[in-house]
Amino acid sequence: MPEIVVAAQSRTTIGKNANRRLRAQGMIPGVLYGEKKEATQLAVSPKEIGAILKSASGENTLFDLDLGGSKRKVILKEYQVEPIKGRLLHADFYEVALDKELHIKVHIELSGTAVGVKRDGGIIDFVTRELEVACLPTDIPDKIVVDVTELEMNRHIRVHDLKISDKVRVLTDADLVIVHVVAPRAEEEVAAAAAPAEGAAAEPEVIKAKGKAEDGEEAAAGDKKPAEKAEKKEKK
């Protein structure tokens, strides 16, 4: 895989007005930090960060951040997305040491058509969609592929059933169910139970975004719309 280098610029001004001006110039604010290292305020191109997020390894991509000619090995730790048009608003980068383990979450992808679906008319219930693992930065898997071809009705695959590289240590509970095949009626009952009661207010759509609000203002734990808060702050 070719080495990825993202150019970054140091910035000294922070706050919503400074960030608005920065975005008007085609850049977004960001922060670079690492273990026992002071945080550095910087600016990067949202197009370059967007390309990384769309790559096979996504937010777990290991790349170089070029800050004034000094390259730092980093991963994209957190990011914010504008809720309406999906534009990137902010990005945080974590500087890694290539000889030290990282704790990171990796997405799971299902492969094949389960025999319990094809032969018995069951439905796939994809329960756990990511695993927490520990590994060196250079050994981060793009994704974990789970083959469900032999999965029969009312059978399941657990974490301990997965075949994962010896270079990757799984931190997620070994007994956790990844996927199983259930009867259609059971699936419908689960969906009905999860649906809001008649007349109850519907839950707002969750906006996909990670992490902290701008310049150290952390989003409230469990807040489903941190990016929307960022938008409201910009409008003030």
Image: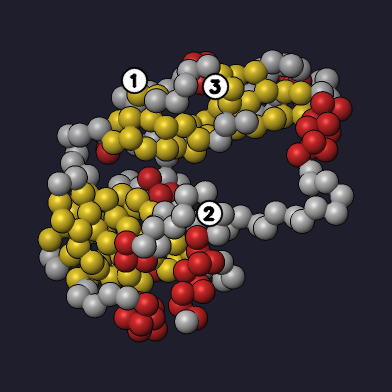
- Would you call the spot at circle 2 few (<14 residues within 10 Å), some (14-19), or many (20 or more)? few
Q: Earlier in the sequence, mark 1 or mark 3?
A: 1
Amino acid type, callout 3? Leu
Q: Position of residue 167 (x, y in %)?
A: 31, 24
Q: Position of residue 64 (x, y in %)?
A: 23, 55
Nearer mark to the viewer, of 1 and 2: 2
Residue depicted at 59% across the width and 22% down the height: 177
Whole-number angstrom distance, CA of label 1 to CA of label 3: 20 Å
Q: Which mark is residue 176?
A: 3
Who is closer to the viewer here, 201 or 177?
201
Apparent side of residue 12 relative to residue 233 in the rendered image (left or right): left
Question: Residue 184 is drawn in which quadrant?
Answer: top right
Residue 152 vertical position relative to residue 49 in the rendered view, above or below: above
Instruction: Indicate the secondary structure of the residue bearing disc 3.
Output: loop
Apparent side of residue 122 relative to residue 165 in the rendered image (left or right): right
Q: Are the residues flagged by discs 1 and 3 in contact, CB closer than 8 Å?
A: no
Instruction: Indicate the secondary structure of the residue bearing disc 2.
Output: loop
Residue depicted at 49% across the width and 81% down the height: 235
- Would you call the spot at circle 1 few (<14 residues within 10 Å), some (14-19), or many (20 or more)? few
Q: Position of residue 195 (x, y in %)?
A: 79, 43
Question: Residue 44 is drawn in which quadrant?
Answer: bottom left
Residue 43 vertical position relative to residue 80 in the rendered view, above or below: below
The residue to which callout 2 is attached is: 223
